[in-house]
Amino acid sequence: MGRCHRQDERINRIVSEMFLQGVSTRKAGKISHLLWSSDVSPAEMGRMSINVKSALSRWLDRPIAKRFAYLLIDGVNFEVCRKRVSREAALCAAGIMERGKREHLGFIQGHRERQKT
């Protein structure tokens, strides 16, 4: 594998991690300019986010063949900024095997909290 290809893969991983951490496209462009003296275009960010979303979808859709002694399901609310700031839930599932080993099984985005009237 050539040096440029390895560097491209490294940049893709870093930008993908920024995407997962919720860094906006504008901020990711500024960060990439500071790191590599070049911008990551919104189109490149979109392409990289599709790769991350695809890998996440494959993981979420995987079959779960293990047996668990306990199944834990919990949720937490986060402030999410879309067109406006709202609180949304993330619902998570984890399994615990008989010997105590834990495994994260999946998560889904829940609904927004109801506004007080």
Image (cartoon, rainbow, N blue to C red):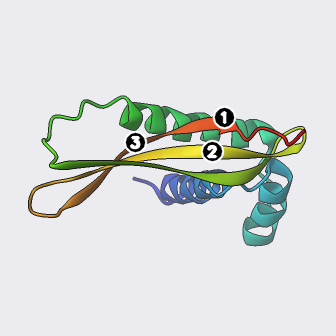
Mark 2 falls on what kind of element? strand
Residue type at the position of mark 1: His
Foreground mark, 2 or 3, reads 2
In-front residue for pair 23/109: 109
Mark 1 falls on what kind of element? strand
Between disc 3 and disc 1, whose residue precedes? 3
For image coordinates 16% across by 64% down, the residue present is: 100
In-front residue for pair 70/4: 70
Q: In this view, does 111 lie above or below 89?
A: above
What whole-number distance in Å separates the C-alpha atoms at marks 3 and 1? 17 Å
Which residue lies most toward the left here?
A: 99
Direction from residue 59 to residue 70 in the image, left or right = left
Residue 25, horizontal then vertical, whole percent = 80, 49
Which numbered disc covers residue 111? 1
Q: Name the residue under label 2.
A: 89
What whole-number distance in Å separates the C-alpha atoms at marks 2 and 1? 6 Å
Between disc 2 and disc 1, whose residue precedes? 2
The C terminus appears in which quarter of the rendering? top right
Which numbered disc covers residue 106? 3
Residue type at the position of mark 2: Ala
Q: Using a 10 Å C-alpha cutoff, classify the residue at mark 1 as few (fewer than 14 neighbours), some (14 to 19) or many (20 or more).
A: few
Direction from residue 112 to residue 20 in the image, left or right = left
Which residue lies most toward the bottom here?
A: 34
Q: Do the residues labelled 2 and 1 touch (CB within 8 Å)?
A: yes
For image coordinates 63% across by 40% down, the residue present is: 49
Image quadrant in which you'd find residue 66: top left
In-front residue for pair 49/21: 21
Between disc 2 and disc 3, whose residue precedes? 2
Which numbered disc covers residue 52? none
Residue type at the position of mark 3: Gly
For image coordinates 51% across by 44% down, the residue present is: 91
For image coordinates 80% across by 41% down, the residue present is: 42
